[in-house]
């Protein structure tokens, strides 16, 4: 059996090119409520994305969404603006584990 060495995230942001609401669980919402993170909860409500054929747009105002609403580009790399309390699916994600990741190998 081959030992699998965990890959280090390259912070390219490709795994964050999705509607955050689609991956947020009831447990995440309960945790944010307990943490008093109304900023996160309000943004999720306001920026809920809908699929517009080939891209995501805000259901509130039709603004083009480039990916997760908490994804930001700083100092030549992508960063999560809520990293310390990000959703469970994001905490569990392993670089290279999906085809969207540039490090993916079959």
Image (cartoon, grey):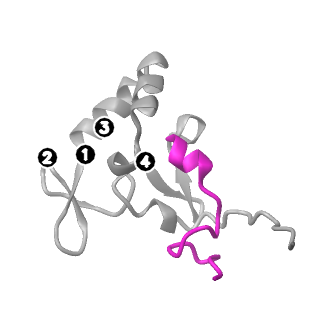
Q: Quadrant of the N terminus?
A: bottom right
Q: CA distance from mark 1 to mark 3?
A: 6 Å
Q: CA distance from mark 1 to mark 2?
A: 6 Å
Q: Earlier in the sequence, mark 1 or mark 2?
A: 1
Please give the residue where the numbered disc 1 appears in the rendered image. 47
Please give the residue where the numbered disc 4 appears in the rendered image. 70
Please give the residue where the numbered disc 3 appears in the rendered image. 43
Q: Are marks 1 and 3 in contact (CB under 8 Å)?
A: yes
Q: Position of residue 75 (x, y in %)?
A: 60, 60
Q: Residue at x 46, y 17 (%)?
A: 34
Q: Quadrant of the C terminus?
A: bottom right
Q: Earlier in the sequence, mark 4 or mark 3?
A: 3
Q: Indicate whether 58 appears above or below 6.
A: above
Element type where label 2 sits in the image: loop
* Crowd around label 1: few <14 · some 14–19 · many ≥20 (10 Å): many
Please give the residue where the numbered disc 2 appears in the rendered image. 60
Q: Residue at x 58, y 63 (%)?
A: 77
Q: Indicate whether 64 appears above or below 106.
A: above
Task: State left or right for residue 9 relative to residue 44.
Answer: right
First to last magenta residue range: 87-106
| Outermost left residue | 61
């Amino acid at each position: 059996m081959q030992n699998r060495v965990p890959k280090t995230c390259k912070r390219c942001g490709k795994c964050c090119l999705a509607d955050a609401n689609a991956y947020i669980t009831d447990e995440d919402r309960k945790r944010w409520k307990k943490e008093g993170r109304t900023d996160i909860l309000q943004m999720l409500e306001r920026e809920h994305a809908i699929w517009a054929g080939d891209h995501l747009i805000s259901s509130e105002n039709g603004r083009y969404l480039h990916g997760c609403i908490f994804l930001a580009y700083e100092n030549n790399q992508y960063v999560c603006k809520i990293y310390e309390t990000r959703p469970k699916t994001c905490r569990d994600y392993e670089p290279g584990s999906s085809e969207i990741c540039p490090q993916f190998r079959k």
